[in-house]
Amino acid sequence: MSDYKAWPFDEARQILKHRPLPAGHTVLFETGFGPSGLPHIGTFAEVARTTWVRRAFAQLSGMPTRLQAFSDDMDGLRKVPLNMPQPEMLAQHLGKPLCRIPDPYGCCESFSGHMNNKLREFLDTYGFEYEFLSSSQAYARGDFDEGLGILLEKAEEVRALILPTLREENQSDWSPFFPICPSCSSVNATRVTAYHPERRTVRFVCDGKGEEGLGCGAQGEVSVLGGKAKVGWKVDWALRWYTYEVDYEMYGKDLIDSARLSGRIVRLMGRQPPVGLTYELFLDEEGRKISKSVGRGLTVDTWVQYAPLESLLYYIYQNPKRARRLYWDVVPRCVDEYLESLRRYPEVAEEARPEQDVWHLFAAGSQVPQYQALVNFSVVNNLISALGSDSRELLLDYLGRYDPQVHQYLEVVQALVEKGLNYYRDFELPNKKFRVPTPEELQLLVQLRQRLAATEAQDEETLQGLPFDLAREAGIEAKEFFRLFYEVVLGQERGPRFGSFVRLVGRERALQMLDEKTAG
């Protein structure tokens, strides 16, 4: 069992090797979420990947485990996200903790409450087992009190670790603590002027030397307990690790330096940092890091609106140490690769299945769906585009003609049809433009119709040869002929292979569509 090479098992073995795990210990896995914007795929991926490591660890060790999804909703809003409603309202709350800012969508108790609910919605949809905890909850109920006392006593030692990593102009005023101003609620405009560990308090001034502009000018002394102050990012990570004795937490490549500093701080506090995987980042189409604040990159919402959720998990599972571009064009291909993995799974010997990606996706192999139909997402999308129909029943009828096995796997196929229709309605249908052919082009289409009607061939390759032969005889590039067919008959710039198209919609429907464009 311990010889499995799938990456979640490699991570599980690192926990067994490097963490003290006494008898009766429940191994804690943690993920972090910054609710400054809607959860994107990177956020979802961290929970999914940690879950797969957790399952692999349970498989190897038999020890009890739990997963804590932690949201830092006490963080201050530094800028107005570009993809949010009510930007003017949000601008009035810059610098305040996310949990104290109204929800711009108007449905939840706060800005962070909305983002936290969206994250939980997706985690619950897939059935992840986790315990959700927010920073505001943890501070208010005293989870961090012991660690905050230690940090207050060791404030200068923490400063000595952090200051060399800061720009010189930011060093003098930096503090591990960020008081929340009792007057204006800003957490980003305050700065600490004195520490009083004996009283568990700090003195502060709200003079707005942060990047959000001027503070309100208030000053005074506040407790560091009870949510009246928070600690900064790197210190916060160490505080969580210390408080909850986290055994495993992964993080993105952009946080390597933060993780190292947090590890030094938690050691200073008297405990060891968790084991963790450093994963590569998801990039947008242009190779830039996906961003919540500017809405760059696919959201989980977008993926599951237009493709099955399981395909997203399949994409996330693949080699977390390799950077991957994430934009719409990768989605249909990923769905088809996921379906192919389902088809192969029953052929894998029982003892080798933990090496398979879908074993990890579906509760350690216990819920892997069966799927042996030939229909994939590309076939479904091509059919929807070709027929131009909103009827699920009609689409399923055509798919059944294409592959009679479809009716044995209706749950999977119906999900493909539903997602394909969503994409067709939102993106393809509004952009369909049927081009009027020139007289010469019309004759080519008439000849294609005649040859299709005359052939007895049923296989895709022979059918695919018909437009190739016509293009060669007419002295034009085959790709120009196909573009002509797509733009005139289908109302789009691209489409399926001609042979696949005829096999999918049937010869009679293909002839009918050509008749509609060549009649008269």
Image (cartoon, rainbow, N blue to C red):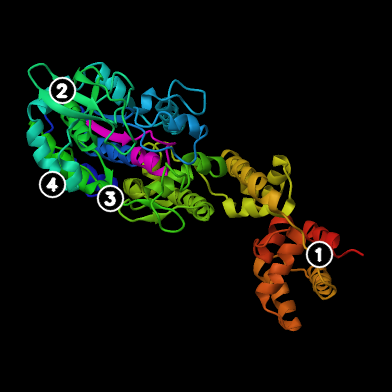
Q: What residue sits right under mark 3 in the picture? A: 253
> What is the C-alpha distance between the residues marked 2 and 1?
76 Å
Q: Position of residue 31 (x, y in %)?
A: 30, 35
Relative to 32, does residue 325 appear above or below in the rendering? below
Which residue extends farthest right? Answer: 520
Residue at 36% across, 42% down: 360
Residue 30 part of the magenta-drawn span: yes
Q: What residue sits right under mark 2 in the picture? A: 202
Please state, as top left, top right, bottom left or bottom right, where the N terminus lies in the image.
top left
Look at discs 2 and 1 and give the one toward the viewer: 2
Residue 380 vs residue 141, the one in the foreground: 141
> What is the C-alpha distance between the residues marked 1 and 3?
52 Å
* Residue 436 - label: 1
Tell me the amino acid under the disc marked 1: Val
Can you see residue 432? yes
- Asked if disc 2 and disc 4 are in contact, CB closer than 8 Å, the reply is no
